[in-house]
Amino acid sequence: MNFNDLLQITLITLIPTLELRASLPYAILVLELPWYSAFLWVVLINILLGPLVYFALRFFLHLFIKIPFFNRVYEHSLHKVQTKIKPKVEKYGEIALALFIGIPLPGSGVYTGALAAFILDIKPKKFMIAAILGVLIAAIVVLAVVLTGSEFFQWVIKKF
């Protein structure tokens, strides 16, 4: 892995809604990096992203919601957190937040998980545990899909 590869992977990982769901497949399928190197780098970046977003919300959210676009995104996220995530976190604790972060679908992930933790006033330590577990869940699921899919496509190419 060279610096340019790491930079590309990092930048893709930092894009909200894409995160490791896009950067891990990109690293393995496009940059053709070894899966274990790509996995470790993407997981590390995504885990570090969690507290950055969580603490940035504490310091900057009041400024951003004055901007109409960000206010709409915040209101939409607030509604989603209150209707979907809060009841599950109240019932199952931080494991529910970890699973929410770990579901590799758009709209879930560290950014939304940090916002949910902020809105639900989850303590930083508990959020970090949920974020680490969620990132690992998402990374393992995405890696399994990528490796299975790449093997399948290589088999198809060889056959036809």
Image (cartoon, rainbow, N blue to C red):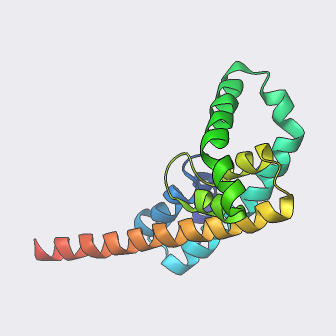
Q: Residue at point 80% right, 53% down?
A: 52
Q: Is residue 107 visible?
A: yes
Q: Quadrant of residue 78?
A: top right
Tell me: 16 left or right of 116.
left
Q: Is residue 131 visible?
A: no
Residue ranking furthest to the front: 91
Q: Quadrant of the C terminus?
A: bottom left
Q: Residue at point 18% right, 71% down?
A: 157
Tell me: 53 left or right of 33.
right
Residue 131, compared with residue 85, is above or below; it is below
- The location of residue 144, given as percent across then percent down, is 43, 73
- The location of residue 127, given as percent across then percent down, is 77, 60
Tell me: 79 left or right of 125.
left
Residue ranking furthest to the right: 59
Q: Residue at point 12% right, 76% down?
A: 159
Residue 13, compared with residue 27, is above or below; it is above
